[in-house]
Amino acid sequence: MPGIDECLLEAMALPGARGASLVDWTSGLALGTAGDSPVGDHETTAAETAELARAAAEYESFAAGPADTGEPKGPPVEDLIVATRSGYHVLRFVETTFDSSVFLHLWLDRTEGNLALARIRLRDLSERLVLG
């Protein structure tokens, strides 16, 4: 089970990965970073992506629908994808046994990255990630 640094290094091994981070969306702080930042500063990127994550996690429009059953655990959103002209930003919410407010952020090059593969691998990483 990988810790934060190992998890981010695995994310950076994906084709087209330019940067990765684990971010607390309530505070906007990066808990770990690897690679580059789209704006040259990981803390700025963490704060900006946290605003997006917070909106997706808290807005009623994205809440679980009537077909969902059982107790909700974590935010109702699994992934948030932002496509830019040069890349993709994939935010994967991490479910934990405690009240988690963290997500993995992967920045992918649009021509070299594989969005489907990135989503699958981030899901796997988020399930194996050990926060402690």
Image (cartoon, rainbow, N blue to C red):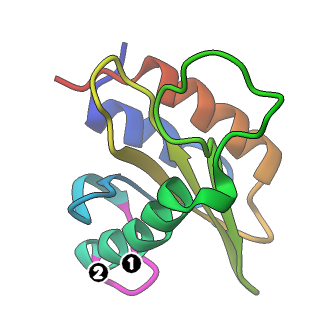
Give the residue type that dot 2 points to. Thr
Q: Classify mark 2: helix, strand or loop.
A: helix
Relative to 86, say whether 35 is above or below: above
Range shown magenta: 35-41
Q: Give the percent coordinates (x, y) of residue 34.
A: 34, 55
Q: Quadrant of residue 36?
A: bottom left
Is 22 included in the stretch rendered in magenta? no
Q: Is residue 90 above or below residue 123?
A: below
Looking at the rendered structure, the kind of residue marked 1 is Glu
What secondary structure predominates along the stretch shown in magenta? loop
Query: Are there few (<14), some (14-19), or many (20+) residues within 10 Å of tag 1?
Result: some
Residue 77, percent from left and from top: 61, 46
- Could you tell whether 35 is left or right of 78 in the image? left
Count of number-bearing discs: 2
Question: Is any atom of residue 16 visible in this view?
Answer: no
Asked which quadrant contains residue 54, the reply is bottom left
Give the CA distance from mark 2 to mark 1: 6 Å
**Residue position marked by numbered label 1 in the rendering:** 48
Depth order, front residue of 79/37: 79
* Residue that carries the numbered disc 2 in the rendered image: 44
Q: Is residue 69 visible?
A: yes
Q: Quadrant of the C terminus?
A: top left
